[in-house]
Image: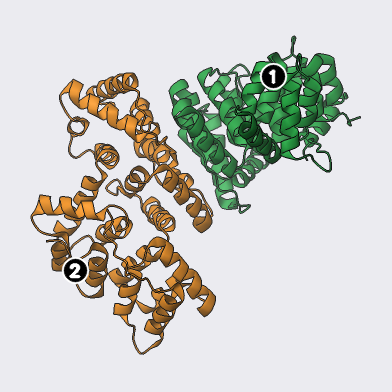
Chain colours: A orange, B green
Amino acid sequence: MATLSIPQPVPSPAEDAELLRKAFVGWGTDENTIISILAHRSAAQRCLIRQHYAQVYGEDLLKSLDKEISGDFERAVLLWTLDPAERDALLLNEAARKWHHSNNVIVEIACTRSSEELFAIRRAYHARYKRSLEEDVAAYTSGDFRKLLVPLSSAYRYEGAEVNMTLAKLEAKILHGKIAEKAYSHEEIIRILTTRSKAQVLATLNHYNNEFGNPINKDLKSDPKDEFLFTLRAVTRCMSTPEKYFEKVIRLAINKIGTDEGALTRVVTTRAEVDLKVIKEIYYKRNSVPLSRAISKDTSGDYEAMLLALVGRDDA
Amino acid sequence: MATLSIPQPVPSPAEDAELLRKAFVGWGTDENTIISILAHRSAAQRCLIRQHYAQVYGEDLLKSLDKEISGDFERAVLLWTLDPAERDALLLNEAARKWHHSNNVIVEIACTRSSEELFAIRRAYHARYKRSLEEDVAAYTSGDFRKLLVPLSSAYRYEGAEVNMTLAKLEAKILHGKIAEKAYSHEEIIRILTTRSKAQVLATLNHYNNEFGNPINKDLKSDPKDEFLFTLRAVTRCMSTPEKYFEKVIRLAINKIGTDEGALTRVVTTRAEVDLKVIKEIYYKRNSVPLSRAISKDTSGDYEAMLLALVGRDDA
């Protein structure tokens, strides 16, 4: 359910690398070529192009891009061109270093990637930053947020579909009890949400809804201004309905006065090869405007062209 | 610095599997053959023997062993024959389920294995138990111990040799301040010990010793009966002087009235292929008795023979 479209037959990495090089060396830069190649290749293909480019031209493709383009367009092209694990490592590093309650990137990445993907990100983090992900998350956050974000970003959840219903009932009751006491950062809430498999957490949240009459996120909204509750709600939404979560991030980014390009670029580049097609469908249902049209309205130039190449123009 | 000795040339996995099968099917069991083969093959070779045995005889070698042998001998042979990551997963599962303050197995495995090894253990844990390691550690422990053991067992520490001395000084001061306040389970102590690279933790502990006049473990002994302090000391010892830590585990296991076969078997089987040679040297220096002789004195029969085959008889 990706939106990525790849031409058939796909040119060789050597041809792609050569065309990209030509797009850089001439008078000015040929942005159309950059988009028409990179925005229509899979992660594995982009990786081969980067390898080939470095071998033949003695420079990392990302470095050449960095010299040639700038602004939101550059950010979108660089994020997209990176290997997905490297890209998430970069996003997490930025989110940790500039950490703020309102920034849910750590939650988003920790809770919407698979266990193996999250581990690949931790490995890429070592290679790039010479530190561990959890080390930075722990160093830059504090208090209740640290208690939640460190185990979330160190998790290696079991991914089987098996569910223990007795346990789900027991833990739904624990969650309800602690929420009723307003003990939102209680270690049992954190333990349940950060260590159980996603299938088990979903069973627990379903039982919570059935047994106590409210979805947990309604009960986690007792104080709409509480920033820790905002983060907890993001955790349960990223685990239970990730596509709806991403639709909302895009919607808020577009509806914001001035557009939140950071969030828009992040969601488009990280989901184009995963589930952006579903996110687009949800966006259309929720907003009665196709996502591509909304993006066109809010962005311009090469940045607009890059996003639309990733999102696809075919939505009606 | 392993003690494992492997014959040259080594027989093929097919030959080994056949001889093992013969050792099982005859009248009684030929324990000498089991020892002479399995105790003298590397982890990779044992894995091939298991694969070959399963293919030809339609049964897992471990299951056949389980039917034929028993007691401490069985435990030693089974633990040894397992793949190292599977073996650690099994030890951790037992330690979590029967968790008790006095049992340092979780600390020992989390702090003496490399980051990649610890991750391989977490993967093996998924496969074998259909749950995650941190899920079980969190579910079976509580209070301060949980606060420490969950991040320890989820860690993926950076493994480079780079050390930030400014940070080491800063964090030595934090550790000293919290220890002086007797805030032993303070989140900053836990953050420093569970997220920093081993090289960084060592630099911090060295600076602590230089700056404050005591090794940290001396300051962590203010109340010798405090079980959490006992666990914290194990963390720093496993990270800074793992071979000395293991020597002490063996020494206490042997000196105990009745011998602690569980601990003795665990250390011998988990270290024979890693650093048991160094541990033996330290043991001899500390006790003036070669480890093989101490083991002979305290154990008997096939169990003794298995341990001695792994430890090596050549120490004087």
* Percent coordinates x, y for residue B151 in the rendering: 49, 35
Q: CA distance from mark 2 to mark 1?
A: 69 Å
- Point out which mark residue B74 bears: 1
Secondary structure, mark 1, is: helix
Front residue of B242/B1: it is B1
* Percent coordinates x, y for residue B108 in the rendering: 62, 30
The amino acid type found where label 2 is placed reads: Thr
**In this image, A147 relative to B7: left or right?**
left
Q: How many marks?
A: 2
Q: Is residue A98 above or below residue B271?
A: below
Which residue position is annotated with label 2?
Answer: A299
Q: What is the quadrant of residue A145 in the picture? A: top left
* Percent coordinates x, y for residue A267 in the rendering: 28, 56
Q: Residue at x 63, y 46 (%)?
A: B199
CA neighbours of label 1 inside 10 A, class few (<14), some (14 to 19), many (20+):
some
| Quadrant containing the C terminus of chain B in the rendered view | top right
**In this image, A128 relative to B85: left or right?**
left
The amino acid type found where label 1 is placed reads: Glu
Q: Residue at x 34, y 83 (%)?
A: A29
